[in-house]
Every structure is written in C-alpha cells, then in structure tokens.
Image (tube, grey):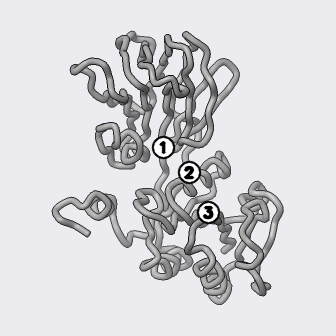
C-alpha cells in the first residue's frame, strides 16, 4: 500500500512520532510518501532512506492509496482541501487536543495501523459544502461562515431555502454546517449534534438579536441562499479560506458534487467519541 503523510510540523510530538511511524510502516512493507511542501524538518527525517519524496502535495495525492493526516482537526481539514475530488481516503491521527475528526490517539496508533494494512477499516463518505459567489467557489468539509471583518457590529441577513423566503435576521454571523462540522463551530454556537451519516445541513445564527431564532436543519440537497445586507462581511470556509463580501452580495450554498472519504478503524464509535471528548456521564 502507498501511504502518504501530511503532518502539522508545529506539533511538539512530531519529532518523536514521525520517524518511528515511518520505520514501522516500511518494516510492514508499506511504501511511505512525504511531500517536501509539507516542510517537515530534515532533522526529523534524517537517515530514513526508505522514504519516497515528492515536491508538491498534488504529487503526494497522486501516489497515495491513503493519506495519514497527523495533527489536529485543522490538519485533517487542510488535507481534505488538498485531496479535493481525488477521492483518496484520509486517516486522521490526533497529535493535539480535542480532535473530533482525528479520532485515533497515539495510544491506539499502531493497533489502528494494523487494522488499516489488514484492510479491516471502513470508509465513511462525508458531505462537503460548496459556496458560490458570482464566479468564485469555496469548499468546506466542516462549515461555511459569514461574519464581520472586525467592526464588532451586528450584521443583517436574509435567507432563502430552495427559493423560498425564510426570514431576515440580525446576528453576529451565520454558520452553515455539515454533519461532520456539527461538532465544530456550530456546536460552540449551541447548534445540534448530527450523526456523520445524516444527510442534512445546519443553518445556525451566532448570537442572534431575537429570542425566537433557533438552528434550522434542512435536507442535504437543499439550495440555500444568504444575503448579508451590511458592509464589512466575509465568507470563510473551514476557517482556512475566505472571500470578502460586498454589501447585498448573495451567496449560494449547497452540497458539493463530491465527498471526502474518512477511514474509520472501529476502535471507537461516534458516541464513544462524544462521551470521551465532551465528558458525558463523568467520562474521561
């Protein structure tokens, strides 16, 4: 199997984990690929002769059957952007803190990798959102956010779903979330938790200026349109890419025509992740 690695080089554990991981994979007859664009220190990769190097992430994707995203959820979201429509599965490994997407902890790393190379893992397809403004498009595995650019002023929004007028709202911002992203920013803004397999999109206002405003869950195949009627707003995809918006500019948001594939080892299920991460029932 050809295994690519995309890692957050700023994580403190990288220096100790990566060399051991690469040696373990090559010992188990796996081909390991690293992109120079990832900017992992040569000190970390020193004397590992079994590595396959390529210049760009694009080449890494082309040469990989699966890609290990090593870091936190931000690293996995970055990896999803790099892969795009290529369809290469992502195996998330948590080197950071909370981590809902990078669910494999270091304690279970080699158990999970054994399952991966033994073809015992499952692949979960995840919805991706597409946001279109005129001729520009952004894509997000977690969410799309419309918010202010720093003025601190409340924004005015108008929302339509499937060409049907919903309402006008005043709020600090608005989040359009996939089921994957329902445990991210939308969750912090008191949105519902959706099972990752749910075919739906969450529309969630941030600090709305009305007591009656609540998150709305719509079908995944819905066409959502939002217009920000205030100056100084921005559209942000997964917290990583953004486009400045003009006053009264309309955004179309819908399910993209491709999905991101996440590798699931089966060591823990979705509800165990919730219990552990959110400390339900006095959990860890």
Give the vertical position of 259 relative to 268 (above or below). Answer: above
Q: Which mark is residue 49?
A: none
Work out whether residue 129 or residue 158 is closer to the camera in this orientation and state it.
158
Q: Is residue 82 visible?
A: yes
Q: Residue furthest left?
A: 281
The image shows residue 49 at horizontal and vertical percentages of 79, 85
Q: Is residue 26 left or right of residue 269?
A: right
SS at circle 1? loop
Closer to viewer: mark 3 or mark 2: 3
Q: Which type of secondary structure does the marked residue at label 2 adopt?
A: helix
Residue in the picture at 79% in, 58% down: 56
Residue occupying image coordinates x 51% and y 28%: 254
Name the residue carrying label 3: 8
Image spot of residue 263 (x, y percent): 50, 63
Helix, strand, or loop for circle 3? Answer: loop
Placement of 211 over or under 265, stated as above or below: above
**Of the residues under marks 1 and 3, which one precedes in the sequence?**
3
Are discs 2 and 1 less than 8 Å apart at CB? yes
- In this rendering, which labeled residue sits more in front, label 1 or label 3? 3
Q: What separation in Å lies between label 2 and label 1 (alpha carbons)? A: 8 Å
Side (left or right) of 232 relative to 37: left
Q: Quadrant of residue 23?
A: bottom right
Residue 218 makes an appearance in the image:
no
> Which residue bears the numbered disc 1?
142
């Amino acid at each position: 199997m050809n295994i690519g690695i995309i890692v957050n080089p700023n994580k403190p554990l990288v220096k100790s984990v990566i060399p051991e991981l690469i040696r373990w994979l090559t010992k188990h007859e796996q081909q390991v690929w690293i992109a120079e664009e990832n900017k992992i220190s040569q000190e970390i990769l020193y004397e590992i002769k079994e590595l396959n190097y390529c210049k760009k992430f694009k080449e890494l994707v082309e040469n990989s059957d699966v890609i290990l995203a090593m870091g936190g959820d931000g690293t996995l979201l970055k990896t999803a952007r790099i892969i795009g429509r290529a369809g290469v599965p992502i195996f998330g490994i948590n080197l950071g803190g909370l981590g809902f997407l990078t669910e494999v902890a270091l304690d279970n790393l080699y158990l999970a990798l054994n399952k991966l190379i033994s073809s015992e893992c499952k692949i979960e397809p995840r919805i991706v959102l597409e946001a279109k403004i005129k001729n520009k498009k952004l894509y997000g595995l977690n969410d799309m956010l419309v918010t202010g650019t720093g003025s601190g002023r409340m924004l005015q929004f108008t929302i339509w779903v499937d060409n049907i007028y919903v309402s006008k709202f005043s709020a600090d911002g608005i989040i359009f979330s996939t089921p994957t992203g329902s445990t991210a920013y939308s969750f912090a803004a008191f949105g519902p938790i959706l099972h990752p397999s749910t075919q739906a999109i969450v529309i969630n206002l941030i600090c709305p200026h009305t007591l009656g405003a609540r998150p709305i869950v719509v079908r995944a195949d819905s066409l959502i349109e939002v217009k920000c009627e205030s100056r100084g707003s921005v559209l942000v995809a997964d917290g990583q890419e953004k486009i400045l918006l003009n006053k009264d500019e309309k955004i179309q948001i819908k399910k993209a025509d491709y999905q991101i594939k996440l590798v699931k080892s089966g060591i823990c299920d979705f509800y165990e992740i919730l219990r552990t991460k959110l400390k339900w029932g006095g959990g860890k």
